[in-house]
Image: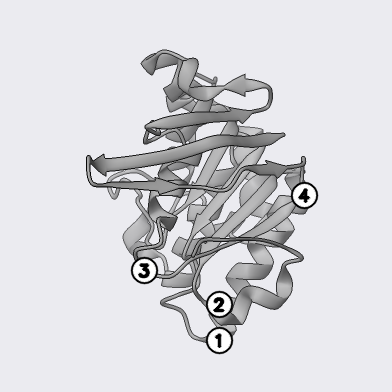
Amino acid sequence: MITLKSVAHSYNADKMIPFKDWEISTAEQWLLLGSSGSGKTTLLHILTGILKPSNGEVIIDNTSIYNLGSKALDQFRGRNIGIVFQRPHLIKSLTIAENLAMAQSFANLQEDHKRISEVLESLDIADRTNAYPNELSQGQLQRVSIARAVINKPSLLIADEPTSSLDDPNALAVLNLLLGQSNLNKATLIVATHDNRVKEAFIHRYELL
């Protein structure tokens, strides 16, 4: 489903960051571990189509993503890759439903209100459909971030440090939501973290030294 082949990246002529080859099967759940400066953010950007590596190839669903043109890559990412950031990035002037519809539009998909309702229901925030981001609690905002990441039924779901700023109960809740949405949508899940609290939930690990 996902393959990294001979991937390496250099921000300057002095240092090349190499990454081990990586094969990920459909619907597997992986932990991406790495200390500060190990290249974790760089690898996340490469996996999500944001940063073209200096060397190597990234293949997702039989598509070599960096062989796509800019517009095609944007649409591929919108349809096939869902990203959960540490902090929600929502448009404050739009309701929750409108934010999710915008994510469908960015992927060049038609608005699907049934899908929006289905996702919000699965995350137990259907009653906040017409609320604005500033009317939600932090926990609800995190659920909306997950909803936006899975709205287009991506084959790859990536979460970047989703629990690092949360207390134990909320960290566990977010982790369970990510695992549950991965199972529900049959999406491959990669959680990048240095949070020791989530390690036991994953069988597969990719570690950066």
User: Mark 4 is on which residue type?
Assistant: Leu
| Residue 141 locus on image (x, y percent) | 44, 62
Residue at mark 1: 168
* Circle 4 SS class: helix
Residue at mark 3: 36
User: CB under 8 Å between callouts 4 and 3?
Assistant: no
* Circle 3 SS class: loop
User: Mark 2 is on which residue type?
Assistant: Ala
> Residue, x 50% and y 40% (percent of image)?
47
Residue at mark 2: 171
> Residue, x 65% and y 51% (percent of image)?
189
Dividing the picture into quadrants, the one containing residue 31 is bottom right
Q: Earlier in the sequence, mark 2 or mark 4?
A: 2
Q: Nearer the viewer, mark 3 or mark 1?
A: 3
* Circle 2 SS class: helix
- On the picture, is 8 further left or further right than 33? left
Give the residue furthest to the bottom. 168
Q: Quadrant of the N terminus?
A: top right
Whole-angstrom CA distance, mark 4 to mark 3, is: 32 Å
- On the picture, is 208 further left or further right than 92? right
User: CB under 8 Å between callouts 1 and 2?
Assistant: yes
The one nearer the camera, 117 or 27, is 27
User: Mark 1 is on which residue type?
Assistant: Asp
User: Mark 3 is on which residue type?
Assistant: Ser
Q: Residues within 10 Å of mark 4 (few under 14, many from 20)?
A: few
